[in-house]
Every structure is written in C-alpha cells, then in structure tokens.
Image (cartoon, rainbow, N blue to C red):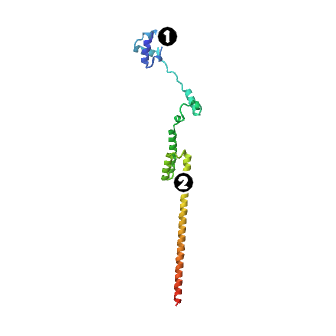
Amino acid sequence: SLKLQKRLAASVLKCGRGKVWLDPNESNEISMANSRQNIRKLVKDGFVIKKPQTVHSRSRVQRMLEAKRKGRHTGYGKRKGTAKARLPMKVLWIRRQRVLRRLLKKYREQKKIDKHLYHSLYNAAKGNQFKNKTVLMEAIHKLKAEKAREKSLKEQAEARKLKAKLKLERVAKRKSEQEALNRELDAKEEPKAP
C-alpha cells in the first residue's frame, strides 16, 4: 500500500492527496520511500507528480451574460427578486437628483439662472417636483418667461407713469403760464377802470 507515500507526497507538493499521481510502473521504488527526503527525490525523478488543475471554463457563463446584455433571459420567469430589489428606488432617486442638480449647476454657471432661482429650484427638485430633466427645463423656461413678462410690464407701467407725470407737468406749466398771462392782462386793464 502506498498510503504513507501519498500522504507524504501531498505534504511535500503542498496539495491534497487527490492531486498526487504516483507512477504505477514504479510502485516498487515508490514503496521503498518512507521519508519526505525520499519523496522529494521521486518528485525530481518524475515518479511522483502533482496533477494539473482541472479546467473550470467560464465560456458558457460569458455567453449567457452577453445574451443578457442584449436583453434575453430576463422575462418574468427568470426573475427572483422584486422590482425594487432588482433596482432599488433609492438608486433611481439618487440618479435623478444628480441629473437635476448637475443641470441646475450648469445653468447657474452659464448665468442662465441667478442664485435665487437656483436655490428655489434646487429645493423644489429635492421636494420631488420634477420627475425628469425635461420637466425641470420646461419649468425653468416658464419661470424665466414669467420673470421677463413681469419685467416688461413693470417697465411699461414705469413708462406710463413717467408719461403721465410729464403730461401733468406740461398741463400745470401751461396753466401757470395762462394764469400769469391773465394776471398781466388784468393788470393792464385795471388803470382804465377809474
């Protein structure tokens, strides 16, 4: 029996007993070896060999993953976790927030929105008011249009006020001129009375 030799060989080759190959043609010589030193000599001679590692191919796995990337094998029957376990809502939320915040930051740097509008929109995004980038962009355009409209209306009101003021001033000036003229005429007519 070569039980001892197999154990010693496993120890020398630093592997399990199943990985040790003992040459069946040299069993007499191997059976004579009863020390690690002798086993080392047999290993050197090639009578005791450490078997190569068995192949564990990943080719089938890679082929399957390639197909999955194309969207195959992902029907209801292939799913084990719930939809929220497969893609958590938190991950979706983080992605959305990052997209919206990136857009707001870009618009602020490009001076498309001022810091006050940025802050209010930032908080609105955090409060789940915009479900995607398009909705946020539309909201920004709407707010900017509203702001521009208010500004133009304000300017028009200012212009109207100024116009009215100038008109009042002209009327008052004309009135005062008329009064002065009337007074002069009265003054000229007064000496004739006696």
- Looking at this view, name the residue that lies furthest to the top: 28
Can residue 140 be seen in the rendering of this structure?
Answer: yes
Quick check: 19 above or below 166?
Answer: above
* Residue projecting furthest to the front: 194
Name the residue nearer the viewer: 84 or 108: 84
Badge 1: how crowded within 10 Å, few (<14), some, or many (20+)?
Answer: few
Vertical position of residue 73 compared to residue 90: above or below: above
Q: Nearer the viewer, residue 111 or 143?
A: 143
Is residue 116 placed above or below 166 in the rendered structure?
Answer: above
Q: Position of residue 112 (x, y in %)?
A: 52, 52
Q: Closer to the observer: label 2 or label 1?
A: 2
The residue that appears at 55% across and 49% down in the rendered structure is 137
Could you tell me residue 40's position as x and y percent?
A: 42, 16
Q: CA distance from mark 2 to mark 1?
A: 92 Å
Q: Which residue is mark 2?
A: 144
Label 1 sits on what residue type?
A: Asn
In this figure, which residue is indicated by the disc labeled 1?
25
Q: Are marks 2 and 1 in contact (CB under 8 Å)?
A: no
Q: Position of residue 23 (x, y in %)?
A: 48, 13
Residue drawn at x 48%, y 53% as measured from the top left: 116
Q: Earlier in the sequence, mark 2 or mark 1?
A: 1
Residue occupying the point 45% across, 18% down = 16
Q: How many other residues sit within 10 Å of disc 2, few (<14), some (14-19) or many (≥20)?
A: some
Which amino acid lies under the numbered mark 2 shown in the image of this protein? Lys
- Residue drawn at 54 percent across, 54 percent down: 144
Q: As rendered, which of 188 and 15 lies closer to the eye?
A: 188
Q: Tell me, for residue 37, which label it has, or none.
A: none
Mark 1 lies on a secondary structure that is helix
